[in-house]
Image: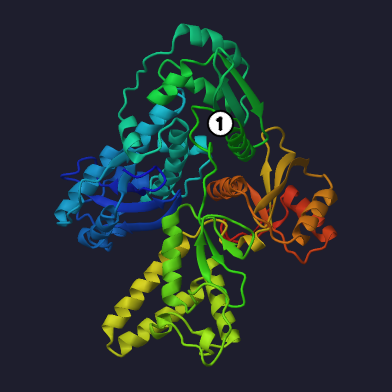
Amino acid sequence: MPSLWDATYVVTDVETTGSDPYSDRIIEIACVVVRGGEIAEQVHSLINPHRFVPPFIEQLTGISNADVAGAPEEDEVMPLVGQLLQQQGAVFVAHQEVFDWRFVEQALGRCRCRVRDVPRLCTLRLARRLLPTERKKNLGALAEYFGIVINGRHRARGDAEATAHVLLCLLEELERRGITTVEEALSFQHQRLSSHGIPKRVLKAVEPYIASLPSLPGVYAMYAADDELLYIGKAKNLAERVRSYFQPSAVLSPHIEHMVRQVRRIEWEETPTELSALLLEAQHIATFQPPFNILHRQPRHYPFLRLTDEQFPRLELTMHHDGNGEYFGPFPHRGMAEELRALIEDMFALRRCSGTIEPSPTAQPCFYFHLRRCGAPCSLEQSAADYRREVDRVRALLHGNADWLIEHLREQMQLAADQLDFERAERLLRRIRELEKLTHRMPTPSASLTQFNLALAIPTAYEDATVELFAFVRGKLIAQCVVGRRQKLGQLAETITQAQQHSQQELSPMEVTALRIATSWMYHNRGHCRALMVEQTWTTGELAAHLERLVRGQQRVVLPFLSSPVEEE
């Protein structure tokens, strides 16, 4: 079984004419595919059920008989769902998985779509075992708990997207409890809700600490009787999170239950925001190496794609950021980076040979030139200017801008179809779909780290009038502070300006981890923060003015990986 983050989760929601999968039918289905911790692709469609949609279903979902009368047939939609479930490492996920799976299984059977025995994960079961018992576990309550906005409640697409984001939050909770593989998660969801019970001596020892915990974000540390540090964790709400370990109904993995039985003392540190808690947790775990922590104990090496710093740049996949070249990423996992590199190598004529080349008309081009995979600048078959233009096209794609290329391929596909060259048209269609899928899966930020100069403002848990500011220069976190909405920010602007003037430096694994934590948090909480890409052409005064507007909520937000440009009120 793959790790939690390497699996392909097909998060599914269905709306139906009733509750019986044999006599009732699906009227709408949505599948949201999650890979590497991010949404990769989606399938969504109404379906003609050839059944009457009852009034209470229409009232709940807003889907009428008129809506589904002209909708696609079941055998047009379900094969697409079957293809998703047939992917290697696919896991079917739903909130109340039994209900959704029974309808999907019956629909696939009617369409004669053979799907292997797919592992199935239920977000409701996971939530019941991972979250405080006093919390409701329906999808709406979980979305509120995790700060997720549902765009279209009781519609398949809105509920599936919300379930996908809930799943990502629950995967993080699983990992914090020592569960790191899909197999362990599948087993954990079926554990009995009644726990083995925490010894009274443990409850008596921790009771004073639990009573004093604030309902604020922060980092907590658990210690044994001999003051040995056992575990470090983060929480959006310290009181809720720590209390959940010691409740009578708490469902803990054997790994974490063994730890909890040893706890005698709890310390904590409040933070202004959840993001600062995440960053502080990673730093403390890497520094103190608690025995019961798995996440962040060793900084993870994320993959990058790099355009080398040469006259004729090459595209490389690297697991380290040494400061040389132009880096894109970090990618969630190596497979995604390799897939994108292979696509670029197939579509663009960049050289693959290593070392410096001295163009000469007497040089013999390698076999990649004869395969039309390289323009052979070494033998002057391609000029330096043409090669730079090819690099610029690759750079545009790595920035997430594939529209120009997709449009060009569509024109080529239409031309091939007009010429009755249907085989070429089919190849181009596959290429277009590959590009659309990959650009949707581009990591955040979808910009080179050379240009990733960003200011991020997050409202704090302390006061409405304060925000926590995070400043990144070329992907490196250089400043983090709490400021008031009327505070002057000339000093912070000066710090950012001076950092921009320095040449690009190596990013350590811990700095890359911090970048990945921050950008992942931004992606999943894009409705709860404001961000600004800092232009290098701004003076210190101009930058200070932009930062002050950002803090006040008056700054124009232009971040393609968060949202479309909007004017903050």
Q: Residue furthest bottom?
A: 361
Regarding mark 1 in the picture, which secondary structure is present there? loop
What residue lies at 23% left-to-right and 40% top-to-bottom? 19
For mark 1, does the 10 Å Cα neighbourhood hold few (<14), some (14 to 19), or many (20 or more) residues?
some
Query: Where is 74 relative to 189, above or below?
Result: below
Image coordinates for residue 192, horizontal then vertical, percent: 31, 22
Query: Where is 434 relative to 265, above or below?
Result: below
Image coordinates for residue 508, horizontal then vertical, percent: 62, 49
Image coordinates for residue 53, horizontal then vertical, percent: 26, 49
What residue lies at 47% left-to-right and 79% top-to-bottom? 349
* In-image side of 521 versus 26 (left or right): right
Q: Amino acid at mark 1?
A: Gln
Residue 524 vs residue 37, the one in the foreground = 37
- Image quadrant where residue 532 sits: bottom right
Residue 381 visible in the picture: yes
What residue lies at 56% left-to-right and 80% top-to-bottom? 357
Residue 106 vs residue 516, the one in the foreground = 516
What residue lies at 75% left-to-right and 59% top-to-bottom? 500
Image coordinates for residue 520, horizontal then vertical, percent: 54, 48
| Quarter placement of the N terminus | top left
* In-image side of 21 versus 275 (left or right): left
Residue 172 vs residue 466, the one in the foreground = 172
For mark 1, what is the residue?
289
